[in-house]
């Protein structure tokens, strides 16, 4: 497939990046070698189109990562090799500073060369590109295959649960049972202890920011049309769905019309990166409302519980990121990446591991079925697909419980870190950890798991020999016409290039941006709008005025704003929204909610204002 003329900006951009790489490695890459490499890239791009930048180059980067995180030699999918070696001719000068002629990692590889190779290879790996119908269907097919696999796992785990519970010795005596039984017993005990003081009824429900399968817009989410009995058995209407008893009396006609019909979730495809779309689930309105409340309470509990607060994280990625850097220093810690993690936590695993009072609530607040993009409805065997507010908390807790239970000693158990599906364990425990997780139905992505060597990746940080080698990855496509998402994203990319000392790339993006936009300020002006770190002199002529009220100069700059619309809903619905969206403590019912502190109320906020989703605009403002 040939190149698209609208994408020629990308090949010009990577040519500038190659210039920066040559500047940083001028001792091994000559100007002549740079010209030959750039010409080679242009020829491949002319022949393969965008696929060369978004698929072929990332394959080289993955081959590099595999060699750095394993004991296998470098195997790059390029036919042309440096004469007498197993190294590719593409960026061969840099590869030769990392590997010997047989493709094995040198005793003291050049980390700067590793960072540069990865930057060139992964620059457009995450770029959001249009998908073909075949690729979309492949994602849906994988979802269906995962459902079938989970169904089989559920049956096996249910049999294990029945066998375990029928034997009092299995449950009570630590010395009785197989190794699997002992791990199961410990996992159940750990979760029982961790969740013993968690009350799933003491929650403050709220709506999530995303779409719902029932189709309500933001202002329509405060009207209930149906809530099934299985939800009401745990979360009564008057306590969890209305602001007060007065609200219940006011909404009497609404209550009479309230139905108990189950509404399925809805699967949708959203842009992810060059590899294809991501599949997520839109939950029904009534489930999203309760799920958000349980999720927030559960996350807060886990991050403050003495058993889990140092091991399981939901709001802070830094422990895992630091763990990746630490693991890359001497190889004492391994990073594990789970494949299709959210699709592999089945209801059987939840029933097997979690205390019964938690299981009852989780099962009552999950979707029973989902509708595929083609309109077909299928029953869900997984606990919750991505999109449910409870997906990641239950996933992380399940992983932690299994690994902590399987850990051979306290030293290993205390060094397990879990953030969603990113896991860090001591390297000596990694093989056993993989075996345990896969036994309980989870899959390990071995290509992205780093067990040997000195390369590690976790929570967005790629590390080698305690050095951050994370590349800058462009996600938003280039646009030759003004677009709000384009402005903010590409200003950020440019600044990242500046900090990484890719000055030719930075200058190229800045000049390209000024051909599309005007009035982009420099950071030194502190305008609060998207700003470049440094702006060439010819682009510094911004309009300026003196603000006599603030006694300071203001500049006319381009900024990204969101359109708001005002929707009037009845007073009790506004009160319900106010209670749910502010930090107000909950005791026995929504009617007891009061603001805990006036500072929790956002300045200038209004319960009648709504931001239009995906409706940002560019605007010239004085800042």
Image (cartoon, helix red, strand yellow):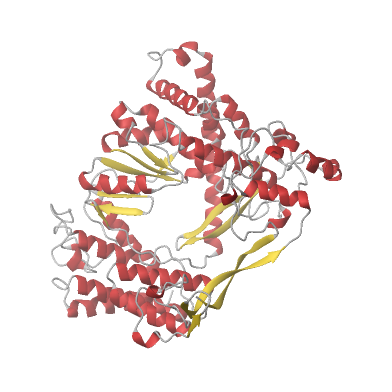
Q: In front here: 327 or 603?
A: 603
Check the image and report above or below for 17 versus 248.
below
Q: Residue at x 24, y 69 (%)?
A: 90
**Where, quadrant-wise, is the N terminus in this rendering?**
bottom left
Q: How many marks?
A: 0
Q: In this view of the protein, can residue 501 be seen by the observer? A: yes
Q: In front here: 368 or 394?
A: 394
Q: Quadrant of residue 187?
A: top left
Tell whether 105 sits left or right of 169.
left
Residue 25 position, x and y percent, is 18, 70
Residue 538 position, x and y percent, is 37, 88
Q: In front here: 270 or 232?
A: 232
Q: In this view of the protein, can residue 378 be seen by the observer? A: no
Residue 618 position, x and y percent, is 55, 76
Q: Residue at x 24, y 71 (%)?
A: 21
Residue 125 position, x and y percent, is 39, 63
Tell whether 615 sits left or right of 149.
right
Q: In front here: 268 or 138?
A: 268
Check the image and report above or below for 48 versus 463.
below
């Amino acid at each position: 497939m040939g190149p698209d003329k609208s994408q020629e900006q990308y090949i010009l951009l990577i040519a500038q990046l190659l210039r920066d790489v040559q500047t940083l490695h001028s001792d091994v890459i000559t100007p002549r070698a740079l010209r030959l490499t750039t010409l080679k890239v242009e020829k491949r791009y002319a022949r393969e189109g965008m696929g060369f930048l978004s698929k072929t180059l990332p394959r080289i980067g993955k081959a590099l990562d595999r060699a750095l995180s394993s004991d296998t030699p470098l195997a790059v999918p390029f036919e042309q090799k440096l004469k007498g070696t197993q190294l590719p001719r593409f960026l061969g000068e840099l590869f030769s500073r990392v590997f010997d002629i047989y493709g094995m990692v040198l005793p003291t590889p050049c980390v700067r060369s590793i960072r540069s190779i990865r930057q060139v290879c992964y620059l457009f790996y995450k770029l959001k590109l249009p998908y073909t119908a075949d690729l979309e269907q492949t994602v849906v097919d994988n979802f269906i295959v995962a459902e079938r696999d989970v169904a089989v796992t559920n049956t096996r785990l249910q049999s294990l649960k029945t066998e375990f519970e029928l034997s009092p010795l299995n449950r009570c005596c630590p010395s009785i049972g197989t190794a699997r039984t002992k791990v199961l017993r410990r996992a159940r005990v750990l979760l029982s202890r961790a969740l013993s003081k968690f009350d799933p009824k003491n929650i403050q429900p709220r709506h999530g920011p995303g779409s719902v399968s029932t189709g309500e817009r933001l202002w329509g989410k405060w009207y209930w049309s149906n809530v099934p009995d299985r939800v009401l058995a745990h979360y009564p209407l008057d306590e969890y769905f209305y602001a007060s008893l007065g609200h219940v009396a006011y909404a009497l006609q609404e209550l009479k019309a309230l139905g108990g019909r189950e509404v399925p979730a809805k699967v949708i495809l959203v842009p992810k990166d060059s590899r294809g779309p991501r599949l997520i689930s839109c939950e029904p309105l009534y489930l999203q409302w309760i799920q958000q409340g349980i999720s927030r309470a559960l996350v807060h509990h886990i991050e403050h519980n003495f058993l889990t607060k140092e091991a399981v994280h939901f709001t802070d990625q830094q422990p895992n990121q630091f763990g990746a850097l630490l693991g890359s220093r001497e190889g004492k810690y391994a990073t594990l990446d789970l494949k299709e993690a959210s699709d592999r936590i089945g209801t059987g695993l939840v029933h097997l591991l979690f205390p019964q009072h938690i299981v009852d609530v989780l099962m009552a607040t999950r979707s029973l079925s989902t509708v595929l993009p083609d309109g077909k409805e299928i029953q869900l065997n997984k606990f919750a697909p991505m999109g449910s507010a409870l997906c990641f908390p239950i996933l992380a807790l399940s992983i932690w419980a299994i690994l902590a239970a399987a850990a051979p000693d306290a030293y290993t158990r205390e060094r397990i870190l879990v953030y969603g599906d990113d896991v860090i364990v001591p390297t000596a425990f990694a093989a056993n950890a993989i075996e345990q997780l896969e036994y309980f139905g989870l899959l390990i992505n071995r290509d992205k798991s780093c067990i040997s060597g000195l390369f590690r990746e976790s929570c967005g940080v790629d590390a080698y020999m305690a050095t951050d080698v994370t590349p800058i990855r462009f996600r938003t496509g280039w646009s030759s016409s003004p677009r709000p998402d384009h402005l903010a994203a590409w200003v950020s990319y440019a600044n990242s290039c500046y900090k990484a000392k890719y000055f030719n790339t930075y200058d190229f993006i800045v000049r390209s941006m000024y051909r599309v936009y005007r009035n982009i300020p420099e950071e030194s002006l502190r305008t609060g709008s998207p700003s470049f770190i440094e702006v060439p002199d010819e682009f510094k002529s911004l309009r300026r005025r003196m603000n006599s009220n603030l006694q300071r100069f203001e500049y006319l700059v381009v900024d990204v704003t969101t359109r708001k619309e005002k929707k009037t809903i009845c007073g009790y619905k506004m009160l319900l929204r106010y209670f749910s969206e502010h930090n107000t403590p909950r005791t026995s019912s929504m009617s007891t909610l009061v603001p805990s502190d006036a500072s929790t109320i956002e300045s200038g906020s209004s319960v009648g204002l709504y931001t239009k989703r995906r409706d940002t605009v560019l605007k010239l403002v004085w800042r």
